[in-house]
Image: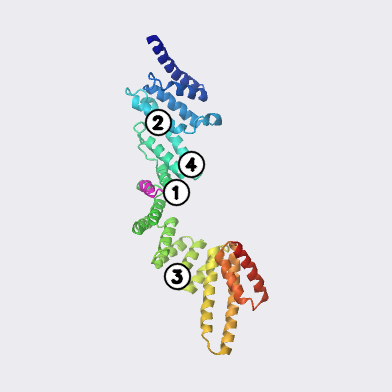
């Protein structure tokens, strides 16, 4: 019986050695089969070398370019990491640990590459998980990497942000900021996250700090502009819009934004000029085209109100004729907007109302009214 038990023990250790031989020969399917059979026996289950061999096999499966091998274990990378950790735990004499640094460097790279792949596919939860493990390995006592991998720290924050983990994202982005990696962008991202969390005070703090240090950052400027435009103090955006325009005078969207600001504060003439400038730079800027049309339409609407107050019939008829001519003059603005963005319901609704107003002035407007109405009904 004693001899029989001993032979089983040697057989299981033999399986581990056999698995290592298969690994060295590149026969990963046989290697996996042998290590899975051999590692759980009482003679091998507490042997650090068994786990070291298992870790190498599963890491090789993950890294293999051959689909048949790669498909042997979809979770090979995590299994490899767990096996390495178990080997270290059991390695009381430190023999295995001396061999690990090179394997750990590759393992960290494997996790980071897996994170990049998941990130590019839009799987941000898995991306963050893999990035975190990659950083964990770098910071382990095996590697004890003294230079932080700032790129991975930053993209862990980005992955967490995209995955909806605001608090986790803040931690990593603050760390990237401390290390001065993508600092201007970190300020903008942190401000955006705090704004989404409803903490406007903290958001503005990061925006102001960031802009003070990086006044050339277009991203910070845009965030500051959007912050004020959506606040109860839209006028605060003007100096930042002027700075943005000075920094990039050919950017159509900055003029559109300033036009919207001037429109909100009642300066319709100034707004119209900004929209015109925006359209000169980018004739296909839908928002500028639509907003410009709205400004001109509002002018006509104000004129219409005044004409409605005229009591003299002759003067009223004269005035209303002018109003209809003005309504007709603004139609091309919205027709062009509808050409740029045919799916804009707001644009089509305005055109429908204008065509309806003018249908008795020109039979063609009745036809246009019917066409746009039919389109709206299908949307």
The residue at the point 43 percent across, 30 percent down is: 80
Which badge, 2 or 1, comes first in the chain's sequence? 2
Task: Say which element carries label 1.
Answer: helix
15 to the left or right of 343:
left
In magenta segment, residue 166: yes
Which of pointers 4 and 1 lies earlier in the amino acid sequence? Answer: 4
Residue marked by disc 1: 162
Q: Which residues are magenta?
A: 161-175
Q: Answer whether labels 3 and 1 touch (C-beta < 8 Å).
A: no
Magenta: main secondary structure: helix
| Residue 101 visible in image | no
Q: Secondary structure at mark 4?
A: helix
Contact (Cβ within 8 Å) of mark 4 with mark 2? no
Badge number at residue 43: none
Tell me the residue at 51%/29% (across/down).
72
Which residue is the site of mark 2?
A: 82
- The picture places residue 139, in percent across and down from the top left corner, at 36, 36
Q: Which quadrant would residue 322 be assigned to in this image?
A: bottom right
Is 265 in front, or is 36?
36
Q: Are marks 3 and 2 in contact (CB under 8 Å)?
A: no
Dot 3 or dot 2: first in sequence order is 2
Q: Residues within 10 Å of mark 2 (few under 14, many from 20)?
A: some
Marks 3/2: CA distance?
Answer: 59 Å
Q: CA distance from mark 4 to mark 1?
A: 12 Å
Give above or below for 111 relative to 90: below
In the rendering, which numbered label is found on residue 264?
3
Q: Is residue 84 magenta?
A: no
- Nearer mark to the viewer, of 3 and 2: 2
Nearest the eye: 361 or 94: 361
Reading the image, the residue beneath label 4 is 118
Q: Earlier in the sequence, mark 3 or mark 1?
A: 1
Marks 3/4: CA distance? 43 Å
């Amino acid at each position: 019986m004693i001899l029989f038990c001993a032979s089983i023990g040697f057989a299981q250790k033999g399986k581990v050695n056999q698995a290592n031989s298969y690994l060295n020969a590149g026969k990963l399917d046989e290697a996996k089969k042998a290590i899975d059979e051999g590692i759980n026996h009482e003679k091998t289950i507490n042997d650090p070398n068994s786990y070291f061999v298992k870790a190498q096999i599963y890491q090789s499966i993950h890294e293999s370019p051959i689909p048949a091998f790669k498909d042997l274990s979809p979770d090979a990378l995590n299994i490899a990491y767990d096996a390495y950790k178990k080997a270290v735990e059991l390695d009381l004499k430190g023999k295995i640990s001396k061999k690990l640094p090179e394997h750990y460097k590759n393992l960290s790279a494997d996790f980071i590459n897996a994170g990049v792949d998941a990130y590019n596919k839009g799987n941000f939860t898995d991306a963050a998980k893999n990035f975190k493990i990659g950083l964990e390995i770098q910071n382990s006592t095996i590697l004890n990497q003294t230079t932080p991998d700032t790129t991975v720290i930053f993209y862990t924050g980005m992955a967490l942000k995209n995955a909806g983990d605001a608090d986790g994202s803040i931690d990593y982005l603050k760390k990237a900021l401390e290390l001065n990696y993508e600092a201007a962008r970190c300020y903008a991202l942190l401000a955006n996250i705090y704004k989404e969390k409803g903490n406007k005070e903290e958001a503005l703090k990061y925006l102001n700090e960031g802009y003070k240090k990086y006044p050339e950052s277009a991203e910070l400027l845009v965030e500051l502009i959007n912050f004020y435009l959506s606040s109860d103090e839209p006028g605060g955006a003007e100096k930042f819009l002027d700075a943005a325009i000075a920094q990039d005078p050919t950017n159509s969207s900055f003029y559109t934004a300033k036009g919207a600001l001037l429109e909100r504060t009642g300066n319709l003439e100034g707004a119209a000029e900004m929209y015109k400038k925006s359209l000169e730079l980018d004739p296909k800027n839908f928002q500028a085209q639509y907003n410009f049309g709205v400004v001109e339409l509002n002018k006509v609407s104000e004129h219409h109100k005044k004409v409605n107050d005229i009591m003299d019939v002759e003067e009223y008829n004269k005035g209303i004729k002018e109003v209809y001519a003005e309504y007709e003059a603004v139609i091309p603005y919205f027709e062009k907007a509808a050409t740029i963005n045919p799916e804009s319901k707001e644009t089509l609704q305005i055109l429908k109302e204008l065509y309806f107003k003018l249908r008795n002035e020109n039979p063609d407007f009745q036809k246009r009214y019917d066409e746009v109405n039919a389109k709206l009904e299908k949307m």
